[in-house]
Image: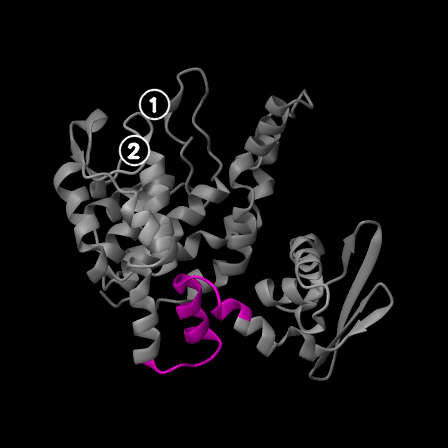
Amino acid sequence: MWCYGEPQAGWLKTRYPNNESMRVSRETIYGSLFGPPTVEVAHAGKVNVAWRTGQELRTACYNRPMPLHDYSPRPAHIQWLLDADPAIRWQVMNDLTDEAPDVIAAERSRIATEGWGAQLLAAQCPAGYWGDTRKWDLVTLNSLVALKDLGLDRKQARKMVDRIDKRLLLTWLNNRPYFDGETEPCINGRILGLGAYFREPNGALAKQLLDEQLEDGGWNCEAWPFLSPKRPPSRCSSFHTTICVLEGLLDYERAGRKSAAVTKARQRAPKIIFWNAACSARFAPAKSSTSAGCASRSRRFGITTSCADSIICGMQESSQIVASVKPSKV
């Protein structure tokens, strides 16, 4: 469990060998990402035990106690974040330093003209896509998702969105407009969220996703027979696809399209996040230790090897996805 903080802690120690204020334990990094640990965790053959005493949290890690204040960000850490890209700075100002709204807005506006955001915007082709003409679909999707995550303001994205609206068509789907979505729910969930953030909420695409929800409450791109006539459709939700759709539906509601149907669909899904592995019995065990065997074992759990990190995202956000928007009376 602590492995999620160990590489970062080692990098800080190497990068700042003479600066004690930049020394951060792997437990502190993990706690800042996922909250203080409250369960017994085993790592590399050694056990870390966390327990609560009153209002304090004490952790025994390699026989060294870790006080609660270690989880609080230190001034040197905040300054290190503020020395980063504008996409990082405005979120630090918003979440950690409580700057005035106009100061935060001014910093956020720099995303379109400086750093990572500006580089991504400049990489868009006049035809509206990113990448080359042969493999532009996923490159374009990931570029748009990155710009959304960086916090690019929709007013500053008008030129980018106009190019997509006017010139980017899904030719293999009878020239369907890009923001109308395609066939796979993992992609459509992201497109729904992108459209709600940069344009207008797409009610037809949201309805399509609701109609594709599986009995266990989630979604899976392999649940439809058109993918392969040799393999029966999956009855088990995919963890990654479910997260993509949940985030898209949440963005859809945040854009002003609250509805009882969407909220109900989102509230059905979190149980599959925690119990996804129960579907493994529906698939035959992997027979190989090769990469193909690894992929087969991953498929038993409804995820692919490239999507395994979504588990961390899902465990962290699933409760927020359920509780963030109250059902409408409509």
Looking at the image, which is closer to me, 322 or 75?
Answer: 75
Q: Which mark is residue 226?
A: 1
Residue 141, compared with residue 35, is above or below; it is above
Q: Residue at x 65, y 73 (%)?
A: 71
Of the residues shown, which amino acid type is indicated by label 2? Thr
Q: Position of residue 312 (x, y in %)?
A: 56, 52
Placement of the N terminus among the 4 image quadrants: bottom right
Q: Which mark is residue 183?
A: 2
Residue 143, compared with residue 182, is above or below; it is below
Residue 241, compared with residue 24, is above or below; it is above
The magenta stretch is: 80-101
Q: On the rendered structure, is 295 left or right of 211?
A: right
Considering the numbered disc 2 on the image, is that residue within a helix, a strand or a loop?
loop
Q: Mark 2 or mark 1: which is in front? A: 2
Q: Position of residue 47 (x, y in %)?
A: 82, 58
Evaluate if marks 2 and 1 touch, with contact meaning CB atoms under 8 Å apart. Answer: yes
Question: How was this image coloured?
Answer: one colour
